[in-house]
Image (tube, rainbow, N blue to C red):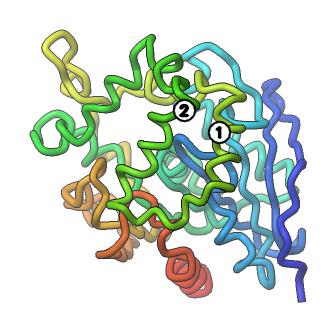
Amino acid sequence: MSDSSISTGNFAELADGITLHYASCGEHGRPLALFVHGFPEYWAAWEDVLPRFADSFYAVAPDLRGFNLSSQPPEVAAYKARAIVADLAQLIAKLGYDCAHVIGHDWGGAACWQMAISLPKKVNTLSILNSPHPIPFARALANDQEQQQASAYMNWLRGPWAEKALAEDNFARMENMLRSLSRAQTGWLTEERLTRYREVWGRGLTGGLNYYRASPLYPPTTDDAGARKLKLDPNDFVVRVPTQIIWGMGDAALLPCLLDGLDELIPDLRIERLERATHWLVHEEPQLVADLLREFFDSH
């Protein structure tokens, strides 16, 4: 029986000078499951899920570059997708593995999509939680008025004022971001957890915000065509690894239209729709999410 406690304070030194902090659970040498968080979180986005994999997997949750205890380069260009993917690929190798079951949420999901597309041999299976594939996201940002409105916050977060505004009143806007997207399902956001989030945010917000600034995927405005500028060939974004999508259907920022047409881009696809969950489905339904992930891993 593996120890289901979570080990933190682990660091991987990568070849490009980036250091990634990571938490882990389970026994090294068992199949690797790599859990990748989004904004405005850190490795503990997965703290209710990791112990459920300790008996059969080596479950690892890094702080992405720009977050918490990992390196936080200040330049926007340091947060382009290829850099984040390179970090994850190097981390897999540093942990002594050739490949992993890869699980991503939000911006972590964006990186995992790109890794599965560009480095499929690194990915045993791909599991995505409320993070859109780039092709339907680009289409919706360019043409779907509802998704444009739902994503308008992205342009605000890209602004030079965002760090200062988000830090005001002890990170009140950051707390509201977690609460407002949860449809009042915020029992998971305890005061103890919120205190830890504030500590993480206090270590720096620029890295996390630079994910928005570095991405070409954002809604158009009167001054900037945004995603309308892009000419993406769907053939360049086909995912050729077994893929599972778990989607909280109550996500106010990422709408269900983003699931349309995915079967044309992903030959081996399974979609699980969680009707009661929102963007924060990992916190709201940790047992269900873990069960769906394990079933998918075991089937491959």
Q: Position of residue 203 (x, y in %)?
A: 72, 28
Looking at the rendered structure, which numbered label has been put on residue 198? 1
**Mark 1 vs 2: CB contact within 8 A:** yes
Q: Nearer the viewer, residue 258 or 290?
A: 290
Looking at the image, residue 53 lies above or below residue 154: below
Q: Could you classify mark 1 by the number of other residues whose Cα lies within 10 Å: few (under 14), some (14-19), or many (20 or more)?
A: some
Q: Position of residue 54 (x, y in %)?
A: 79, 78
Q: CA distance from mark 1 to mark 2?
A: 7 Å
Whether residue 15 can be seen here: yes
SS label for mark 2: helix
Residue type, label 2: Phe
Q: Which residue is mark 2?
A: 171
Residue at the spot 19% in from the left edge and 57% down from the top edge: 257
User: Relative to 138, is 20 on the left or the right?
Assistant: right
Q: Nearer the viewer, residue 103 or 232?
A: 103
Sequence-wise, the earlier of marks 1 and 2 is: 2
Residue at the spot 49% in from the left edge and 35% down from the top edge: 172
